[in-house]
Image: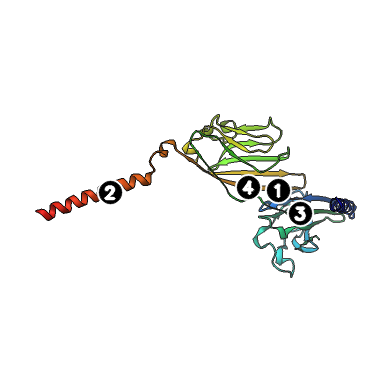
């Protein structure tokens, strides 16, 4: 109880001090390990500004007004190489992307966008949750059964979730429960799942009914969590194997053994014939 109270006090302290921080906009961003995050500057293409990004007060990206100077990561500072090729700076808008986030990316990201006289600051307080978004889930069942691919998420209406099978779209939810499509009703929808897929609106989990052997393969769930100033993108993968019912008789291994035995007998007979002649 005391611990809870202390953490609450700590959070309130942070909110208070973050919000009053020199009149800049403050955002809290909580991705999972492996997510990609884009921080928007709000700068329009061709609008000329000097843009600098700092991580925990170290400059990690910069682009100047006429794009004659651009740097990211250790090109901008003398510190240790932190992001390597996981950091991207959009040279039109100055927006910053961190790919494949790690827990060590947690901290304060400060944007300074300087126009002729005014300066527009934004602070993104990033707390990478110690949860791996991207581990592969393996699911197995027999033909005709139902399969549930669990998103592991609790949705709200700013989550856009899209399910793919071999790069074809099989289901998508873009907002409330009515903004859902499945199989051929989705743009680029996959015909093979016609009337066999459903989405759970609370979680975005996918349900495939009456599975077929041909449903086996790799499924991908893409989750895009959008805010006016940042976007988190998460990808989850599922490996599904559906066993065909006719394969459930004697295993193909046993069949091979029988043929091998027949072959041996034939070989022995042949040898006998040759010997006796
Ligand atoms: C950045 O700052 C945060 C908050 O003070 C701290 O928890 C984190 O360890 C720092 N990260 C690095 C890499 O310095």
Mark 2 vs 3, N-terminal side: 3
- Badge 3 marks a residue whose secondary structure is loop
Percent position (x, y) of residue 66? 75, 58
* Picture residue at 66% right of the left edge, 38% below the top: 204
Q: Which residue is mark 3?
A: 127
Distance from Cα at disc 4 to Cα at disc 3: 19 Å
Pointer 1: residues within 10 angstroms few (<14), some, or many (20+)? many
Mark 2 vs 1, N-terminal side: 1
Pointer 3: residues within 10 angstroms few (<14), some, or many (20+)? some
Percent position (x, y) of residue 206? 61, 37
Q: Which residue is mark 1?
A: 232
Residue 217, placed above or below residue 183: below
Q: Nearer the viewer, mark 1 or mark 3?
A: 3
Pointer 2: residues within 10 angstroms few (<14), some, or many (20+)? few
Percent position (x, y) of residue 71? 71, 63
Return the residue nearer the eye: 277 or 149: 277
- Residue 152 image-quadrant placement: top right
Mark 4 vs 3, N-terminal side: 3
- Badge 1 marks a residue whose secondary structure is strand
258 horizontally vs 105: left or right? left
- Badge 2 marks a residue whose secondary structure is helix
Distance from Cα at disc 4 to Cα at disc 1: 10 Å
135 horizontally vs 120: left or right? left
- The circle drawn on residue 235 is 4
Return the residue nearer the eye: 268 or 14: 268
148 horizontally vs 124: left or right? left
């Amino acid at each position: 109880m005391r611990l809870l109270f202390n953490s609450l006090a700590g959070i309130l302290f942070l909110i208070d001090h973050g919000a009053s921080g020199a009149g800049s906009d403050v955002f809290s961003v909580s991705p999972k390990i492996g997510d990609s995050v884009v921080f928007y500057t709000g700068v329009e293409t061709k609008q000329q500004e000097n843009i600098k990004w700092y991580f925990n007060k170290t400059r990690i990206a910069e682009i100047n007004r006429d794009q004659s100077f651009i740097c990211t990561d250790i090109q901008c500072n003398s510190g240790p190489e932190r992001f390597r090729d996981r950091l991207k700076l959009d040279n039109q808008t100055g927006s910053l992307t961190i790919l494949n986030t790690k827990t060590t990316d947690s901290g304060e990201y400060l944007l300074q966008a300087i126009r002729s006289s005014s300066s527009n600051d934004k602070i993104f307080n990033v707390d990478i949750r110690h949860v791996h978004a991207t581990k592969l889930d393996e699911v197995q069942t027999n033909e005709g059964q139902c399969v549930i691919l669990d998103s592991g998420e609790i949705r709200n209406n700013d989550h856009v979730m899209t399910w793919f099978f071999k790069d074809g779209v099989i289901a998508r939810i873009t907002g409330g429960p009515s903004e859902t499509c499945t199989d051929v009703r989705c743009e680029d929808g996959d015909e093979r799942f016609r009337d066999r897929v459903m989405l759970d609106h609370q979680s975005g989990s996918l349900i495939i009914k009456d599975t077929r052997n041909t449903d086996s393969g790799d499924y991908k769930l893409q989750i895009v969590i959008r805010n006016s100033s940042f976007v988190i993108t998460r990808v989850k993968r599922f490996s599904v194997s559906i066993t065909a019912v006719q394969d459930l008789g004697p295993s193909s291994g046993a069949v091979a053994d029988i043929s091998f035995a027949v072959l041996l007998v034939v070989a022995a007979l042949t040898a006998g014939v040759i010997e006796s002649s």
